[in-house]
Amino acid sequence: MSHDLDRRDLLKGAAGLLAASSLLATPALGKAADAVATTAHGKVRGATLDGVHVFKGIRYGADTAPRRFMAPEAPKRWSGVLDALEYGPASPQRGDKEKASEDCLFLNVWTPALRDGAKRPVMFYIHGGAYSGGSGSSALYDGTKLCKRGDVVVVTVNHRLNAFGYLYLARLAGEEMADSGNAGQLDLILALRWVQENIREFGGDPDNVMVFGQSGGGAKIATMMAMPAAKGLFHRAATMSGQQLTASGPLNATKRATTYLTALGLAPERAAEARTLPVEKLVAALSATDPVIGAGGVYFGPVLDERHLTRHPFYPDAPPQSAHIPMIIGNTRGETRNLIGAGDPTTFDLRWEDLPARLAQHMRVDILPEVVVAEYRKLYPALSPSDVFFAATTAGRSWRAAVVEAELRAQQGSPVYAYQLDWGSPKDGGKWGAPHTLDIPLVFGTLDAPESITGTAPDAVSVSTQMMDAFLAFARTGNPSHKGIPEWKPYTLPNRETLVVNATSALVNDPRGAERALFAKVPFIQQGT
């Protein structure tokens, strides 16, 4: 997960890759019929298209502007029927690619039927973009295909991001700002409470809710697994290239708040004045250099505030309150091929003499890069310097936290299933391999979405079918096994059973075990915390 890259840049696709596919083509456009649902706060009108009822932009929380940096509140009841035909605004963020507003607490629902008592599994997706950007409105997250294939209810959600959701002012502005460091997490918890209260109307089962999310979305899930306020609101969890071992400590979070306030032209004792500044000024200040990392914009993420988060998510152990919840932890084989490579094309043309210095810059663990290079050349003599760079940075900074979480869950005796996506994108002659974000369209079946880089060739369809059916099985039963893949056994120690996902998938014990052991010799502290 990266906090300093534009998520949209990571998701760019190539239209030339997208061929027609009868199985995965977007439903043909046609006149949509109305669908009306009654929520606890009022009635909403969605659209019915191709047998799926779609509600976009359902309000689950009140406008956050009057309560900036504070805990969210449920919306007031409305009369009449509100249209739920367009996605709601995203949280304010850098860049102009999202329609944004502080009035951003909206969610979206896809369902096969309304009010039929079918008790369908609910798949609640949390978007990535670190804690800084994105929304639940991407075409990659369209729930139509999952909904139809698995007879499930799909929900996506917007919530407060960056400073609006995670600026920790408790030590600077007092009790009124006590919730500020985790306001974005509290938004998600409010959305899950909305599900508990309303999802029966949409044909879903409030007692069978699966949260799943990629990158920052997975990290938000890992954090909620340790938040008492989230207890009982979800029953399965799946994280895709998104882990959160540690939260930001309150002192580092205060240091970041001070840096951010300085960028706003405010002294720490004037912190409360940030509540009334224009949104545009708050967004512009996000580019201030992070005082802890020393690079990039200011990192905002969940805070160990001893109020809503009283322990680190996965330190020193897996959170006991979630020990009973089945969990999938997955990563892609080449996470950093776009996390780093998309912003620095020179990483695709490295020389051996360049490699140690570049690794030192990007591994995010303190280990001699020359030792890393020597080990990789011994393990994989056919790899180029750039291949070694992407393999080692993926193992050191991205995969490492997933391994730690899976091991802690196994030590706890908790149900956990691991996957590694090896299948690679065909884009640009295969240059990108299996990069960060590749599993999103595979799980949603949105191979033909504009931002997908999967293409729609038979092998892409095969991999997508395997992953869709695994996530659907997991949502329904808590076990992701299905007839299209080998039996997916839980991750145990020392076996480390992992589903290696490819055109033909295999269950492998401890894949890349030598790489895992190499990086296990040094401590790992999650960047930003």
Image (spheres, rainbow, N blue to C red):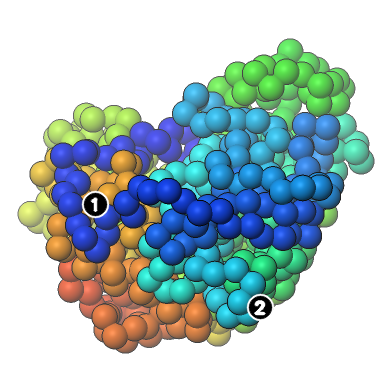
Upstream in sequence: badge 1 or badge 2 = 2
Q: Is residue 206 left or right of residue 62?
A: left
The picture quadrant where one finds residue 320 is bottom right
Horizontal relation, residue 384 to residue 409: left or right: left
In the image shown, does 239 or 172 lie closer to the viewer?
239
Residue ID at (77%, 19%): 277
Q: Residue at x 87, y 32 (%)?
A: 173
Q: Which residue is mark 1?
A: 454
Query: Can you name the residue that lies furthest to the left here?
Result: 382
Circle 2 residues within 10 Å: few <14, some 14–19, many ≥20: some
What's under tag 2, amino acid-wise?
Asp
In the figure, is residue 457 to the left or right of 49? Answer: left
Q: Which residue is mark 2?
A: 207
Graded by Cα atoms within 10 Å as few (under 14), some (14 to 19) or many (20 or more), the crowding at tag 1 reads many
Q: Position of residue 390 (x, y in %)?
A: 26, 46
Q: Is residue 205 visible?
A: yes
Q: Residue 156 in the image: state x and y as whole percent.
A: 55, 54
Q: Quadrant of residue 41?
A: bottom right
State whether residue 96 is above or below residue 471: above
Task: Assess whether mark 2 and mark 1 are in contact (beta carbons under 8 angstroms).
Answer: no
Which quadrant does the C terminus fall into?
top right
Q: How many marks?
A: 2
Residue 435 image offset from top left, x and y in percent? 29, 49
Q: Residue at the spot x=50%, y=54% of the render?
A: 33
Amino acid identity at mark 1:
Thr
**Spatial CA span between label 1 and label 2:** 34 Å
SS class, disc 1 = loop
**Farthest residue, direction top:** 265
- Secondary structure type for disc 2: strand
